[in-house]
Image: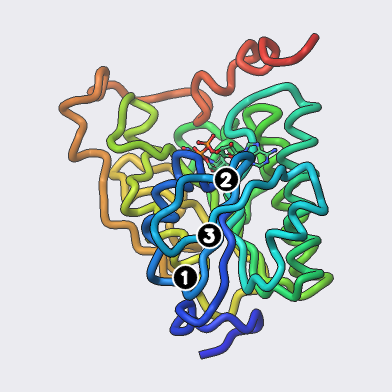
Amino acid sequence: MNDQSGVDSANLRDQTWVVTGAAGTIGTRLVADLAGRVNRLVATDLAAPDAPYGVESVAADLRDQDAVAAVLAGAHGVVHLGGIADEADLHDLAEVNLVGTYHVLEEARRAGARRVVYASSNRVTGCYPCDVTVHPSMPPRPDGLYGAVKVAAEGLCQLYADKFGLATVAVRIGSYEERPLDLRQLSTWLSPADCSRAFRAAMSATDVGYACFYAVSANTRGWWSLEPGAALGFLPQDDAEEFAATVPDAARTMRGPQGGDYAAPEYTLSRQRR
Ligand code: NAI
């Protein structure tokens, strides 16, 4: 089954995929999960990551377009996780998370790659109130500069699909943890197993031009529509509620913005150079 992108879910085993940010929390786990499912897997990060047997490991700074080009040579697809993973000074976010994502998309296009899977974030909609069910088709309401830059990077993904025919999937990751740690995460938790399911679906779903979905577990208190993920074959299996007894304040109902503390002005202002 070939889609517009030419990616055939049955043929990941014949393909070359690159994972950026492969030394990070999600990347380490995802690379281990993908090893053996993909013909050739290249793990890259600022320093060459420790990689499982059979996985290539390469150092590349996302700010260096030539270095990104060298890593992406021959790739069918890229899972782009690399970058600053939380609120930071906007100049740094722009350089690493926005220009770095441009480097990945543009060098994927130049290399003839067929698909880029982008690690976006739930923080693109963190200013929606907790009592609203958010669907990816709704306008972004980022809860900080990190989220605003993720919105811009999603825009680049849409552009590369519409203008250049590169299939792109923006995966809005929830809160990736072994288990939910606080009241907010009873709504936003993404278990490691569901994270792997989300990325494998994004890599192999057919009929993709541009797609965007929330990668979140099937939480009883969830805030985000699961339909767009299900349409790509992402069916989460875990539920944060199973851990509610271990979560402080679990009896409370969260109110205010979905971003919680991330949405407070000081969270952003304290991270700017001035
Ligand atoms: P992480 O911070 O553990 O990993 C990010 C990796 O990117 C690091 O290994 C870092 O060395 C690398 N990196 C940073 N700057 C780089 C540069 N200039 N060139 C090359 N590599 C660079 O983050 P984590 O948690 O694994 O997240 C992965 C992605 O998922 C990030 O894009 C993050 O924004 C996104 N995300 C993560 C969530 C979570 O709950 N962990 C939630 C929402 C989104």
Secondary structure, mark 1, is: helix
Please indicate whether residue 121 sits to the left or right of residue 199 in the image: right
Mark 1 residue type: Ala
Q: In the image, what residue occupies the spot 52% across and 31% down?
A: 129
Percent coordinates x, y for residue 220 in the rendering: 28, 44
Dot placed on the residue nearer the N-terminal end, 2 or 1: 2
Mark 3 residue type: Glu
Residue neighbourhood size for the residue with mark 3, other residues' Cα within 10 Å, grouped as few (<14), some (14–19), many (≥20): some
Read off the residue under disc 2.
48
Image quarter in which the C terminus is found = top right
Please indicate whether residue 249 sits to the left or right of residue 49 in the image: left
Res 78 seen here:
yes
Secondary structure, mark 2, is: loop
Q: Looking at the image, is mark 3 or mark 1 nearer the viewer?
A: 3
Please indicate whether residue 53 sits to the left or right of residue 250 in the image: right
- Disc on res. 231: 1
Q: In the image, what residue occupies the spot 62% across and 29% down?
A: 143
Indicate the quadrant where residue 151 lies. Answer: top right
Dot placed on the residue nearer the N-terminal end, 3 or 1: 3
Percent coordinates x, y for residue 172 in the rendering: 54, 48
- Disc on res. 56: 3
Marks 2 and 1, how far apart in space?
35 Å
Marks 3 and 2, how far apart in space?
9 Å
